[in-house]
Image (tube, grey):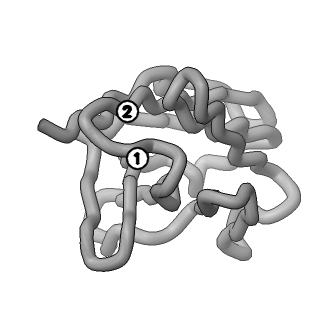
């Protein structure tokens, strides 16, 4: 059974930082493209960042330069470091694991950026 468990969300002031982590189980982790997506109230889910099995990264324009995605294949985790957070970063952040047509999602973790 595939499980993706996110942690690290919370309330942070504008300009602050958060580090989200996702622990995976039930998949052959090192062959999957891992990613982070987010969904704000009333909006569609959108890409934040992905990291491929070979370590290639991709970021949305909204977070590029402020975020870093990384993976640890030994620990089967993927992290998202977010800096200089803005109120518009407020959303539920979801971890994803994708391999060809297979796509799995975590339950999400809330990030709220507010003073």
Residue 19 % position (x, y): 65, 27
Helix, strand or loop at mark 1: strand
Helix, strand or loop at mark 2: strand
Q: Residue, x 29% and y 58% (percent of image)? A: 41
Outermost residue, right side? 65
Q: Is residue 22 above or below residue 37?
A: above
Other-residue count near label 2 (Cα within 10 Å), few / some / many at <14 / 14–19 / ≥20: many
Q: Residue, x 47% and y 36% (percent of image)? A: 111
Is residue 115 in view from this perspective? Answer: no
- Residue nearest the viewer, comparing 13 with 68: 68
Q: Nearer the viewer, mark 2 or mark 1?
A: 2
Q: Is residue 10 above or below residue 86?
A: above
Label ID, residue 66: none
- Residue nearest the viewer, comparing 8 with 84: 8
| Residue 49 image-quadrant placement | bottom right
Residue 56 % position (x, y): 74, 64
| Residue 5 image-quadrant placement | top left
- Residue nearest the viewer, comparing 106 with 55: 55
Q: Which residue is mark 1?
A: 95
Is residue 55 in view from this perspective? Answer: yes
N-terminal of the two: label 2 or label 1?
2
Q: Residue, x 66% and y 28% (percent of image)? A: 18
Quadrant placement of the C terminus: top right
Quadrant placement of the N terminus: top left
Q: How many marks?
A: 2
Q: Which residue is mark 2?
A: 24
Outermost residue, left side? 1
Other-residue count near label 1 (Cα within 10 Å), few / some / many at <14 / 14–19 / ≥20: many
Q: Is residue 2 left or right of residue 25?
A: left
Contact (Cβ within 8 Å) of mark 2 with mark 1: yes
């Amino acid at each position: 059974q595939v499980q993706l468990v996110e942690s690290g969300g919370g309330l942070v002031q504008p300009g602050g930082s958060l580090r989200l982590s996702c622990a995976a189980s039930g998949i052959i982790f090192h062959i999957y493209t891992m990613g982070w997506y987010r969904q704000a109230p009333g909006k569609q889910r959108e890409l934040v960042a992905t990291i491929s099995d070979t370590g290639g990264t991709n970021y949305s324009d909204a977070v590029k330069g402020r975020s870093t995605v990384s993976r640890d294949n030994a620990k089967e985790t993927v992290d998202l470091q977010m800096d200089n957070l803005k109120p518009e970063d407020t959303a539920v952040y979801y971890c994803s694991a994708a391999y060809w047509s297979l796509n799995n999602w975590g339950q999400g973790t809330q990030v709220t950026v507010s003073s």
